[in-house]
Image (tube, helix red, strand yellow):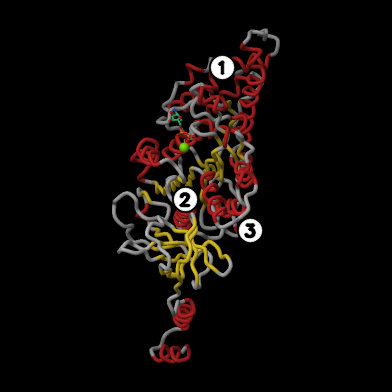
Amino acid sequence: MFSLMESALDAVGASDDLLDEAHLAIREADLHRRTGRVIDLIGLITEATGLEAEVGEVCTIETGRGRASVPAEVVGFRQGRTLLMPLGDSVGIGPGAKVIATGQPLKVDVSDALLGRALDGLGRPLDGKGPIEHASWRPAEAAPPDPLSRPRIHERVSLGVRSLDAFVPCGRGQRIGIFAGSGVGKSSLLGMIARSTSEEINVICLVGERGREVLEFMQRDLGEEGLARSVVVCATSDQPALVRLKAAFTATAIAEYFRDQGRNVMLMMDSVTRFAMAQREVGLAIGEPPATRGYTPSVFAMLPKLLERTGTSPKGAITALYTVLVDGDDMNEPIADAVRGILDGHIVLSRKLAHAGHYPAVDVLASVSRLVGEITTPDVRAAGNEVRKLMATYKEKADLISIGAYQPGSDPLIDAAIEARHPIDGFLKQLVTEPSSAESADATLSQLAQLSGTWEPPVVDGYLVDPNASIAAGNGADGGMPLHNAIPPLHIPS
Ligand SMILES: Nc1ncnc2c1ncn2[C@@H]1O[C@H](COP(=O)(O)OP(=O)(O)O)[C@@H](O)[C@H]1O
Ligand SMILES: [Mg+2]
């Protein structure tokens, strides 16, 4: 058959390339329809016999009474039978229903027209604005870039949240986790970042959220202007486990599409814990043994597969933020531990701060960016450490100070920490609607560092940086609380 086609193509003068393509297409083509029959359906798993399909392949299960057929993915095999999990509602599947293999993995439609759109977990439009125009496709699951081809991170991204830009600076292509219990402000913080980050495109993935929260996030947290440069992928908690799982891969594939065009992308996933829970449901359904806290071994294998896809690549970078819902505020629960080990930094939100109305409730002393050395100047780093020192000193002595057991004047560092407390708090608190930038955060940070009384302001080109100018610039740009009210006048030696 090949030789016949070869001579036919030769006759019309086709090139070797075309010939190769034709060979490949024939080799890959499904030349017969592979079908099977449903014989069992227990819980989330449909079992089929006689089906020749690979794991990860999408099949369709025909349903009775004129209903639309149900797409399903092959998730495993047991005693010669194929285990499928529906990518939708399994209503209408009956014994003997026909299962047809498509020969394809799950694909996602991608195009620039995705910006401003809301999609479901499988990448289908949810917002009633019609199909995605000029779409090409990519597989939802893909391999991470080759580790040796990944450029090192050296550029800074402005997150637009002062406490983060100053203390947990983020590099382009860095992956950071946001760890907190429920209701501490993870989603609000993501919304704040999505609106004011310096990155060009946001891909936002809401996995296992409450249905109510999706519109709330899009309208309140993201706003019209934020949405225009964002793609929202969501699979609410009522969706089948496999769809919640796919939402994370779909969003990552969309971020990769924009990255491959060389654009700067920010991927935000809320939350990676719900992704892990979805994989646990899938794992348990196909008979995996439960391990730590009921999570199956495949959960821990799946996490790096997802999280390693973002970051730098030779074509561009995906900066990624993943929220981690920590059960009972236990930062060492297994998913939090696994995710922290994979990512390049973590932001911890504290319930205590949230209760005190300190928003965003970032626990600066518990948060770390592993790339701070690569993306900030030594001056900024030193200033950050100085302010951390003041905060740590105050925290350590807070009990003594509050009961009046500390005698002012006995330790200059504690005196400075008490003095600096309100200015630092004023700097860390920020309204959701209040934009800021990394530059202004750095400038104010070096002013705050001077409150310790031992820190020397950096010398720039032989001149001392004028603190008042920086304060005015920092806060003018932020539009927030004027810091010259919060910080006492500084004495700068001339
Ligand atoms: N920056 C903020 N400013 C004011 N209130 C906030 C802020 N962040 C969170 N909150 C309050 O905390 C509640 C829960 O926040 P949310 O982001 O939904 O938490 P999570 O996603 O961690 O469950 C919000 O409804 C809001 O009342
Ligand atoms: Mg939330």
Residue 282 position, x and y percent, is 53, 54
Q: Is residue 93 above or below residue 171?
A: below
SS of the residue under disc 2: helix
Residue 38 position, x and y percent, is 45, 66
Q: Is residue 200 among the parts visible in the rendering?
A: no
Cβ at disc 3 under 8 Å from ligand 2: no
Q: Which residue is mark 2?
A: 244
Q: Which residue is mark 1?
A: 490
**What crowding class fits label 1: few (fewer than 14 Cα within 10 Å), some (14-19), or many (20 or more)?**
few
Q: How far is disc 2 from disc 3 in space, using C-alphas? A: 31 Å
Q: Earlier in the sequence, mark 1 or mark 3?
A: 3
Instruction: Give the side of residue 113 with respect to residue 328, left or right.
Output: left
- Give the residue at x 42% y 56%: 122
As rendered, which of 376 and 245 lies closer to the eye? Answer: 245
> Residue 320 shows which numbered tag?
none
**What crowding class fits label 3: few (fewer than 14 Cα within 10 Å), some (14-19), or many (20 or more)?**
few
Q: Quadrant of residue 258?
A: bottom left
As rendered, which of 415 and 53 lies closer to the eye? Answer: 53
Q: Amino acid at mark 3?
A: Leu
Residue 389 position, x and y percent, is 65, 25
Q: Is residue 285 above or below residue 50?
A: above
Q: Nearer the viewer, mark 1 or mark 3?
A: 3
Q: Which residue is mark 3?
A: 148
Instruction: Give the side of residue 307 with respect to residue 212, left or right.
Output: right
Q: Earlier in the sequence, mark 2 or mark 3?
A: 3
Q: The C terminus appears in which quarter of the rendering? A: top right
Ligand 1 sits in which quadrant? Answer: top left
Q: Nearer the viewer, mark 2 or mark 3?
A: 2
Q: Are marks 2 and 3 in contact (CB under 8 Å)?
A: no
Residue 104 position, x and y percent, is 46, 68
Q: Amino acid at mark 2?
A: Arg
Q: How far is disc 1 from disc 3 in space, using C-alphas? A: 49 Å
